[in-house]
Image (cartoon, rainbow, N blue to C red):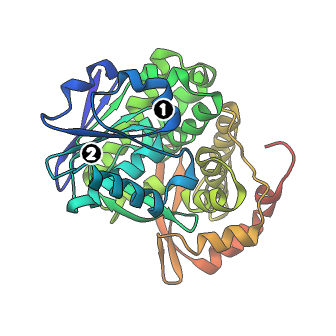
Amino acid sequence: MHAIEITGAAQPSTILVGESMENLGRYLPAGRTVVITDGNVRQIYQNRFPQAPVLSIGSGEDFKTLETAKDLYETMVSLEVDRSTFILGIGGGIVCDVTGFVASTFLRGLRFGFVATTLLAQVDASVGGKNGVNLEGYKNLVGTFNQPAFVLCDMQLLQTLPEAEVVNGMAEIVKHALIADAGLFAFLEDNAANALNLDPSVIERLVRDSVVIKSGVVGRDERESGERRKLNFGHTFGHALEKVSGLSHGEAVSVGMVLAASLSVQRGRLAPAAHDRTIRLLRSLRLPCTAPADVGRVVDAVLRDKKRKADRIHFVMLEDIGRAAVEDIPIAELKAAAAAFEGILQATGRR
């Protein structure tokens, strides 16, 4: 088991990679706990939950909303939750986002922690202290920065995931490798099949290395004023695609990374060979490299991205495998780039 620390402004956060859910009780504070989960996770794992009230939300992005938060607030009022109560989210990225948001805003802030049950949650969504909900379908427009007390990442929980959810999480691992760790990228190239098969030693290294990368960035820039923006590589187009195309988060980020890498090549920042290696790795992990999406709708969604500043947007460019840089790009230039890559966005054949 590897314990990785993030020093947040309000409190430290410990990411427990390889810890068993059976040991959850070691990390829960004394006193009352309330669990937030979704119906699928509750059905599979409820016999491993702590003795505590369990609040369930729906599964999927459609339930990552202020309406869901309101329902949870009202139930917490009826349960007489007070400031001594600990809120525990058990689930994937949506459960973690909603739990962190509700805990951070109810009674002006309660302590909370996560048991991350999906690969996407273990390598990204549960780590770093971003908590939020969507508004009118646009990603994470309402949210907070607040660190969980702990995140427990039990590798055995991944064994119950459908293949699509494993693939979904791989996109964020590739992102971490592309922006910060050429060695991790090469390891993925050599172990793609074993990664998809959840080989224990391979998957634990992928989760650990991803958490080390993200926790290091967050520790240096918790509130995304500089370096943390690199973690958005592929997400400007990715979030837009998620909104307009119906792709999963990982699929949309995969195509977003292809678009960002293509723009990096076009601007002379990335060698074509590195771009091609990126495409090959994504395909070997069964991630899409094109999406059937209308360019105009994608650009319209990009205009609502929270990283936009007036007529410019913080956009992450790739300089090499393992190295990224943030650049302020005029919105007009991003529109032109999207049109130039229309084949990527409107292809309907092999992805």
- Taking the spot 63% from the left edge, 56% from the top edge, the residue there is 242
Compared with 220, 216 (above or below) is above
Which numbered disc flags the more N-terminal residue, 2 or 1?
1
Q: Quadrant of residue 293?
A: bottom right
**Badge 2 is on which residue?**
148
Residue 169 horizontal/vertical position (percent) = 54, 37
Q: Position of residue 200 (x, y in %)?
A: 47, 16
In the image: residue 148, left or right of residue 134: left
SS for dot 1: helix
Tell me where residue 192 sits by quadrant: top right
The reply to whether residue 54 is visible in this rendering is yes
User: Residue at image x 48%, y 56%?
Assistant: 232
Q: Residues within 10 Å of mark 1 (few under 14, many from 20)?
A: some
Residue 41: numbered disc: 1
Label 2 sits on a secondary structure element that is loop
> Between marks 2 and 1, how big is the CA–CA gap?
20 Å
Badge 1 amino acid: Val
**Left or right side of 245 for 106:** left
The reply to whether dot 2 and dot 1 touch (C-beta < 8 Å) is: no
In the picture, measured across the screen, residue 89 lies left or right of residue 157, that is: left
Quadrant where the image shows the C terminus = top right
Q: Quadrant of residue 281?
A: top right
Question: Does residue 84 lie above or below 304 as drawn?
Answer: above
Q: Is residue 117 above or below residue 346?
A: above
